[in-house]
Amino acid sequence: MRLIPSLGDDVTVWMDASPDKVWELVSDVTRIGEFSPETFEGKWTRGSKGPEVGAYFAGHVKRNGVGPTYWSPCRVTKCEPEQVFEFSVGTDAVTANNWGYRLAPSKGGTEVTEYFRLPKSPAMVAYWLVLGHLRGRTNRKGMRTTLERMKAVLEADAS
């Protein structure tokens, strides 16, 4: 029996594209608006120009696709080309959650896993116990939508 619930989830989609092509897409935060049902715009901030550990960017979010609308500050926490791109959402002092993409070569293409994790603080555990099933369902649907849209673009570019 698990006392602390798993505070996150992931979705995996196989794409008929090489890891380098997938990497170009998942690590370019300025393109997220083409794919995400919630984040409709992204931009590098604080002088950052591209993906590297410590780089800052902001995502323009319309929560649940309907609102409220706000900018989320983000910082790249893992950046291993063609393998993993991960970022924290929140301020320098407080991380609200972490999102990322893992890439693995598979069957001539790439298995792409999008995931999110919440910090295991007492407040987040309580939130997840009460509302986690609802937000988790929304996040899973959003991750699947994002990955399927990326897949469509990558596979159309390959044709």
Image (spheres, rainbow, N blue to C red):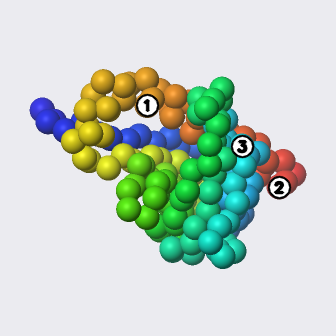
Which mark is in front, 1 or 3? 3
Please say if the residues under marks 2 and 1 sit with CB atoms less than 8 Å apart: no
Q: Which residue is mark 3?
A: 40
Q: Earlier in the sequence, mark 2 or mark 1?
A: 1
In the shown orientation, is residue 47 left or right of residue 118? right
Q: Which residue is mark 2?
A: 158
Badge 2 element: helix
Front residue (pair 30, 149): 30
Q: Residue 9: x, y in percent?
A: 41, 40
Q: Residue 101: x, y in percent?
A: 53, 55
Determine the image quadrant of residue 17: bottom right
Which mark is in front, 2 or 1? 1
Compute the Cα span from label 2 to label 1. Answer: 33 Å
Front residue (pair 135, 67): 67
In the shown orientation, is residue 95 left or right of residue 150? left
Q: Which residue is mark 1?
A: 136
Which quarter of the rendered picture does the N terminus lie within? top left
| Amino acid type of the residue tagged 2 in the rendering | Ala
Badge 3 element: strand
Does residue 106 show up? no
| Amino acid type of the residue tagged 1 in the rendering | Gly
Q: Residue, x 46% and y 59% (percent of image)?
A: 91
Compute the Cα span from label 3 to label 2. Answer: 25 Å
Front residue (pair 136, 97): 97
Q: Residue 46: x, y in percent?
A: 62, 72
Compute the Cα span from label 1 to label 3. Answer: 20 Å
